[in-house]
Image: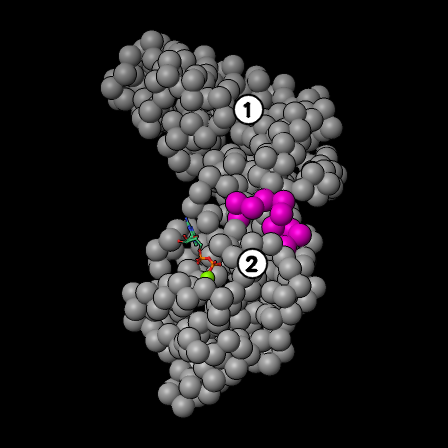
Amino acid sequence: LSDKLDKAMHVLKGHGSITEVNVADTLKEIRRALVDADVNFKIAKEFTKKAKDKAIGQGVLTSLKPGQLLTKIVRDELAELMGGEVTGVNLSGNPSVILMSGLQGSGKTTFSGKLANFLKTKKSKKPLLVACDIYRPAAIDQLHVVGESIGVEVYSNRDEKDPVKISQAAIAHAKQNGFNVVIIDTAGRLAVDEQMMNEIAQVHAAVQPQETLFVVDSMTGQDAVNTAKAFNDRLNFDGVVLTKLDGDTRGGAALSIKSVVDKPIKFIGTGEKMEAIDVFYPSRMADRILGMGDVVSLVERAQEQFDEEQARKLNKKIAKNQFGFDDFLSQIQQIKKMGNIKDLMGMIPGAGKMLKNVDIDDDAFKGIEAIIHSMTPEERTKPQIINGSRKKRIAKGSGSTVKDVNQLLKQFDQMSKMMKMMQGGKGKAMMNALGK
Ligand code: GDP
Ligand code: MG
């Protein structure tokens, strides 16, 4: 019993505040994670420095290591940088015209279908797909297959070689037939070239879309940034679609693109199927880029559940030597609110190994709670009055042994002393953090 408590308490021990020294390793790790995730090195460096400056001196709450808190700070910064609010597409036109741009193979045709399906099923729209890839007959066939699979009409004209004329005719067709969204799928090349840029710029100028989307393969990494810049210079597009995030790519392109062109990422593609579309959530992408999602959710849970007011009161009580079993009980409840102890520990990197030898289960505190419940209010506030006969009574009432009661009393005594000690020196910062 005391062993379990020891271990749980160890996990919950804080580590003061964030300093240059105690987060140096984490900072290095984060920078490496960013670069591994294809974030441009310069951007990664600038970014981690900014996050560190912001974090230095912050008090570390409850069970966290400074590195963990820094990770959380970095994650929040990342999410903010990648976009804050989730923005959809502009559907104000009648019909609303959405133009797809991007390199060949980036996923334009697939995404055109996904978006049509999304608008049809989720927004009750009546979309029309338009085939403007005039160079490859197979591309027109591909869009027809996509349209058929989702029950959306596809406009195409195999005899017309001018994408401007095709799109204009398609919009006229949409107006006549009650389509309220027109999605124009265009031709891309394997690399940025003048002809492709001129062609899409002409379509763009002619149809004046409500929404121009730049579609990019998230696996292209650093190249994605240059491509995004080239398209944005010509089209001043409205948003980015990041495809193929179902692979093992970490999605650093999202951060780099956002830093360079400063346009919101609106959707992500997560597979070849028509349903594999999702709106872009900056915080999820931040987790993915960092590859540290579990640490972040641990931090969040700890912060969420911690009752700061209670902590402040507790702090006072400890100072006045008034910490009693009732306080202890509410501490345990706090810990339990944070979730299953084993889950919680499992989230801490490296703790998995440790857990193999430790038997911490949900009931880790059950025995302790039972013993405390069997104490009278007076015994709880003044544990020193608990003598032999009281111990026997408590043991009997809680279904434990006198030995268990003794152990808990000893443990409690040690803990009170430790808490008192922590109020000075190194523990002070933590207590301040708790009290804030
Ligand atoms: P386009 O040349 O820009 O029109 O690109 P396509 O839509 O033809 O897509 C090129 C390839 O990527 C096709 O094989 C698609 O099935 C595939 N693809 C597109 N989007 C995704 C995605 O989100 N995930 C995966 N795994 N494959 C995708
Ligand atoms: Mg295509």
Residue 13 numbered tag: 1
Q: Is residue 429 in view from this perspective? A: no
Mark nearer the N terminus (1 vs 2): 1
Q: Horizontal and vertical percent for residue 378? A: 42, 26
The amino acid on which the numbered mark 2 sits, given as a three-letter code, is Arg
What amino acid is labelled 1 in the image? Lys
**Which contiguous range is marked in magenta?**
218-228
Q: Is residue 255 magenta?
A: no
Which quadrant of the structure image shows residue 227? bottom right
Along the line of sight, the residue nearer the viewer: 79 or 256 = 256
**Vertical position of residue 270 compared to residue 108: above or below:** above
Task: Kindly indicate the quadrant of the structure image that contains residue 276.
Answer: bottom left
Residue 152 position within the rendered picture, expressed as x and y whole percent measured from the top left? 34, 73
Taking 247 as reference, is 49 left or right? right
Instruction: Looking at the picture, tell me which residue is in the foreground, 4 or 243.
Output: 243
Mark 2 residue crowding within 10 angstroms, few (<14) / some (14–19) / many (20+): some
Q: Nearer the viewer, residue 28 or 189?
A: 189
Q: Report the residue at 52% width, 41% height from top.
A: 250
Q: Main secondary structure of the magenta part?
A: helix
Q: Secondary structure at mark 2?
A: loop
Give the CA separation, mark 1 to mark 2.
57 Å
| Residue 55 location, quadrant | top right
Quarter of image, ligand 1: bottom left
Q: Position of residue 7 (x, y in %)?
A: 45, 18
Name the residue at the front extreme.
Answer: 159
Q: Which residue is mark 2?
A: 189
Residue 176 lies left or right of residue 38; in this view the side is left
- Above or below for 390 versus 126: above
Magenta stretch encompasses residue 225: yes
Instruction: Compare residues 381 and 302 and report the one nearer the observer.
Output: 302
